[in-house]
Image (spheres, grey):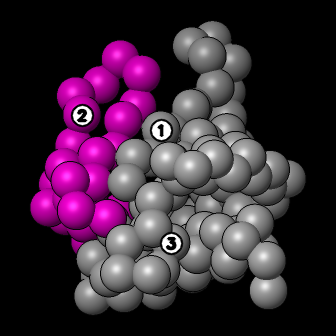
Amino acid sequence: MDESQSVIRAAMQIADAIARRDTDAIVALLAPGFLHRTPGRETRDADAFVSGIREIPGEIIFVRVGSLEVDLSNAGALVTGIQHAQVRIDGKDIDDRRAFVDWFVKHGGEWRIRVAVDLPAAQGVSAVSEGG
């Protein structure tokens, strides 16, 4: 498996762990000093990020990542893609797709996510739709 494929595998493991709310697996995939950013919101550290996953309302149906692109450098790997998640709240399925930019670094010989940037749709453009 080449380095790009290893990074993609790590990104998919994170999505799978979020879908299962497996916070131990999530923590194991975070690099020291992890930060989560969303434009216009406060930066969250690893503890706040994991707490936020625990607090996602309803049932998580799935979390998938796609359209993944990886750019490798000596310093790490930049990953861009689309996250598609679906949750069920009070019997309604909520569908969410958003772009992301993640920075991975090697830690202990494994790719770990160091910075995650969540890019929700611009205000006035809905990225969330309800289905039944």
Residue type marked 1: Val
Which residue is denoted by mark 3 in the rendering? 111
Point out residue 82 in the picture as x, y percentages from the top left corner.
Answer: 73, 48
- The one of 116 and 74 positioned closer to us in this rendering: 74
Mark 2: give few (<14), some (14-19) or many (20+) Cα within 10 Å: few
Q: Which residue is mark 1?
A: 117
Residue at 50 percent across and 72 percent down: it is 111
In the image, is residue 85 above or below residue 125?
below
Q: Which residues are magenta?
A: 31-56
Q: Magenta stretch: residue 67 in it?
A: no
Quadrant assignment, res 58: bottom left
Q: Earlier in the sequence, mark 2 or mark 3?
A: 2
Mark 2 vs 1, N-terminal side: 2
Which kind of residue does numbered mark 2 sit on?
Thr
As drawn, the residue found furthest toward the right would be 67
Rendered-image quadrant of the C terminus: bottom right
User: Residue 43, percent across and down?
Assistant: 24, 34
The residue lying at 79 percent from left, 86 percent from top is 1
Q: Nearer the viewer, mark 1 or mark 3?
A: 3
* Nearer-N-terminus badge (1/3): 3
Foreground: 57 or 50?
Answer: 50
Relative image position of residue 33 (x, y in whole percent): 20, 53
